Image (cartoon, rainbow, N blue to C red):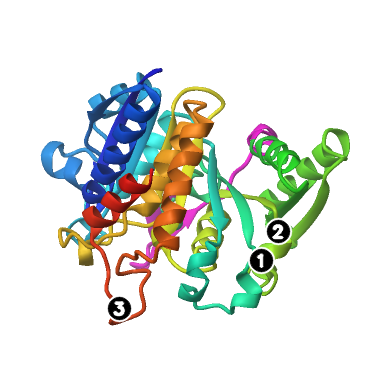
Amino acid sequence: MKAKIVLLPGDGIGPEVTSQAVRVLDAVAKKFGHTFLFDSKRIGGIAIDETGDPLPQDTIDACKASDAILLGAVGGPKWDDPNAKTRPEAGLLRIRKELGLFANLRPIVTFDELLDSSPLKREIIEGTDILFFRELTGGLYFGPSGTEELADGQQRAYSTAVYTTKEVERIVRMAALAARKRKGKLTMVDKANVLEASRLWRRVTAKMMKDEFSDLEYEVVLVDSMAMHLLSRPKSFDVVVTSNMFGDILTDEASMLPGSLGMLPSASLGSDGPGLYEPIHGSAPDIAGKGIANPLATILAAAMLLRHSLQLDAEAADIEAAVKKVLAAGYRTADLAPKGSSTLGTIAITDKVLELL
Ligand code: IPM
Ligand code: MN
């Protein structure tokens, strides 16, 4: 097959890790007889520096005309001034909105080889396999917000969580369909004891589970309690669905179960059109340019891209198997290795993935 893939390397370690994922995609294309055409575009801090806009129009146009998008990371201390006109993160939020990417899939799977890199006990995390569905284009991130000057010289700032029935339905449906293909359990996380928007989530989801998904096991957990259960009984979760802000926080917490943020990919999908794939980790400015960043999350994001946007399941599984073999053979990047042990850099560990592909 022939596919157009837009690359959005972004800032910090973004360019280093995306270029390694491209090497892997090229190797897969060769092995399976596909043609992947890559087009690199600007987003985030680098786009602000070069164009004044964290998401230039030509980036949006190229993404809309593509089959899939692979993103590195955005942001860094250089653009962190709270008084700045715009921020790198605004580019990421806008591309999600422009492309209608309402569902953010974040698989949290422990690798047997890395159980000891987690700060948590082996017996708790072993066998964890959770698929998070984080709502991505609504809620607190996109509701009415602003800052007002008060007469007494204070400022008053607000952000609002807003959801409609349809917004809840489409993400819950996607999550429930995924649960049906997995272990058949859906957990919905909200704060319905306090928040009005959460009570809508609660009503809409309960009705759908009764009308459309009565074959699934359904559980509701309050978000504060979920923060605890994720660490005490991670194995009991299958598919978890939640709002934008709660999903942002809980998936960072959950990323500690497999031990390193450096291993976790994510996919952002809409109802049609290209999906956007990225590592969960950020731009890691402290290690940018040193050649030591772990590219495996981005390489696994490339596997998700093949599976979800190009329907190339065998190719995706091939990449995932190669990554597992690299870990099984004992190769580690600095973030995965105990202090003082020998490690491979960004390019060298990708060489191993290519050898084992
Ligand atoms: C994420 C990130 C983003 C978010 C930031 C960079 C805007 O934390 O993808 O989880 O909050 O969604
Ligand atoms: Mn986040």
| Alpha carbon distance from label 1 to label 2 | 6 Å
Look at 26% across and 64% down and name the residue there.
344
Identify the residue position indicated by label 2 in the image: 237
Contact? badges 1 and 2 (CB < 8 Å)? yes
Relative placement, left or right, of 290 versus 256 is left
* Location of residue 31 by image quarter: top left
Residue 274 location (% of width, % of height): 44, 26
Residue sitting nearer the eye, 190 or 256: 256
SS for dot 2: loop
* Residue 253 seen in this snapshot: no
- Label located before the other in sequence (3 or 1): 1
Q: Residues within 10 Å of mark 1 (few under 14, many from 20)?
A: many
Q: Residues within 10 Å of mark 2 (few under 14, many from 20)?
A: some
Identify the residue position indicated by label 1 in the image: 234
Q: Is residue 217 magenta?
A: no
Give the residue type that dot 1 points to. Answer: Pro
- Magenta highlight range: 145-170
* Location of residue 149 by image quarter: bottom left
Residue sitting nearer the eye, 248 or 239: 239
Looking at the image, is 336 positioned above or below residue 186?
A: below
Look at 22% across and 36% down and name the residue there.
42
Look at 64% across and 67% down and name the residue there.
230
Identify the residue position indicated by label 3 in the image: 341
